[in-house]
Image: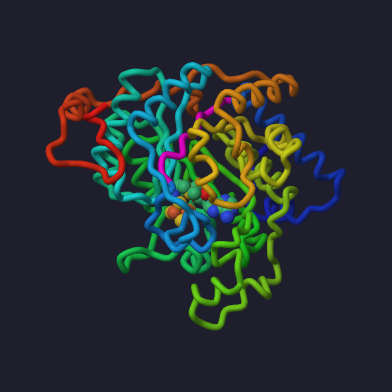
Amino acid sequence: MNAPLEYDAILAWLQEEDPQRLLSLWQMANETRHACVGDAVHLRGLVELSNQCARQCAYCGLRAGNTDLTRYRMTAQEVLAAAHQAVEFGYGTVVLQAGEDYALSARWIAQVVSRIKSETPLAVTLSLGERQPDELALWRAAGADRYLLRFETSDHALFTLIHPGRDGRASDRIAILRQLKALGYETGSGIMVGLPGQTYESVARDICLFRELDLDMIGIGPFIPHRQTPLGNQELWTQFVQAENDLLHRPCANQVPNAELMVYKAVALTRLACPGANIPSTTALATINRQNGRELGLRRGANVLMPNLTPVQYRSLYQIYPAKACLTETGTSCNRCLRLRIGAMGRHVGVGPGGRGARAVFAGRRDVQRELATPASGHHVSRSPSLDCV
Ligand code: SAM
Ligand code: SF4
């Protein structure tokens, strides 16, 4: 195995353009992936359970300020049906992702998690944004195994600019990642590559931070501009910053491009820096290269894919960025397509939950699960029937 890379080497590789030298980077990343996490490609069934969001992230199409988007929230029955479909397809994990939607009450989520854990052998990953420590603790006790929260960029000034705080409080995603680890979650984070104002140096620091945080899962995708967001629309940007700020017109000197090649470099270097992590070849990458973006990600360090299990009527509404891959496909066709692609690469689909190392899937705390099985009094989620009625 290769020695772990340090900041200077990571930065040099990010700036490398020579195709021959890059071939050696891809090879090192692929060998490290093979030696440390094997040839299995783990499939995580993704359920986008709500596109409602209280936040105003300047990059994301689900931001509260996007009034052009029809909003939805799945019912508990729909989420459970998707989880059972994950089992039917042979997936080991279901990922429940949403905007930061406070109408998804802590108890409702805990009940959904508890039901999935009692009815299926699945590992449950949550990706629900920045929620309170007691909520994260309740979901863990209900049986949630993993939590994904990307820090997006380690450049604090840039993050603060494009990810405004709420209720007068700035976001501190790094602190939440540390809380998640202390609660016993397998913890995932990640970045977008090519944000306006993001430098090569800051991406090198992101990769060092992945290692420092000892993350279990690391998702890296290109930033894809969306016309209904400030980072994708000069007019909205001017309203958003309400001050002189020419970030969109004149990005910084060392601006990282939001190009496919940059994403592969970041994925490969992350594999070298964090050899045992689970690293997806992301849907955003498949969006900018539909033909073989997924495969190239898997050949350059990644070992996970996230087939979509969101019911088709909701998929096109989960518009984080435009022209997302697999928008009109059903869960069945996504499953078939990804298995064919994995087989054609000479790799195989992972069996079981595929967590980091040999850690068993968490069963949840029995006392908490018993309590969650009793109907909540006067506790309902708007527009989404409570689990008690399932
Ligand atoms: N709301 C949760 C959160 O923010 O963590 C989870 C859902 S959020 C849509 C998931 C991820 O989408 C974000 O962490 C961000 O990295 C990614 N994303 C948002 N807008 C994007 C864009 N325009 N291009 C690429 N990725 C984007
Ligand atoms: Fe909401 Fe997450 Fe999108 Fe930010 S990135 S607007 S928190 S869904």
- In the image, is 142 to the left or to the right of 125? left
User: Would you place residue 144 above or below residue 352 in this image?
Assistant: below
- In the image, is 256 to the left or to the right of 90? right
User: Would you place residue 88 above or below residue 255 in this image?
Assistant: above
User: Would you place residue 92 above or below residue 329 in this image?
Assistant: above
Residue at image position (65%, 26%) is: 338
Q: Give the range drawn in magenta.
A: 42-50
Give the x, y percent position of residue 237. 55, 72
User: Observer-nearest residue: 50 or 166?
Assistant: 50
Give the x, y percent position of residue 163. 46, 62
Residue at image position (75%, 36%) is: 292
Q: Does the magenta stretch include residue 377?
A: no
Give the x, y percent position of residue 46. 50, 34
- In the image, is 286 to the left or to the right of 176? right
Residue at image position (44%, 48%) is: 51
Instruction: Tell me which secondary structure the magenta stretch mostly adopts.
Output: strand
Q: Quadrant of residue 83?
A: top left
Which quarter shows the N terminus?
top right
The answer to whether residue 361 of the structure is visible from this angle is: yes
User: Observer-nearest residue: 305 or 200?
Assistant: 305
Task: Tell me how many marks there are.
Answer: 0
User: Observer-nearest residue: 20 or 129?
Assistant: 129
Q: Does the magenta stretch include residue 48?
A: yes
The residue most toward the left is 377
User: Would you place residue 61 above or below residue 122 in this image?
Assistant: below
Give the x, y percent position of residue 146. 41, 34
The answer to whether residue 206 of the structure is visible from this angle is: no
Which quarter shows the C terminus?
top left
Residue at image position (40%, 49%) is: 129
Q: Quadrant of residue 343?
A: top right
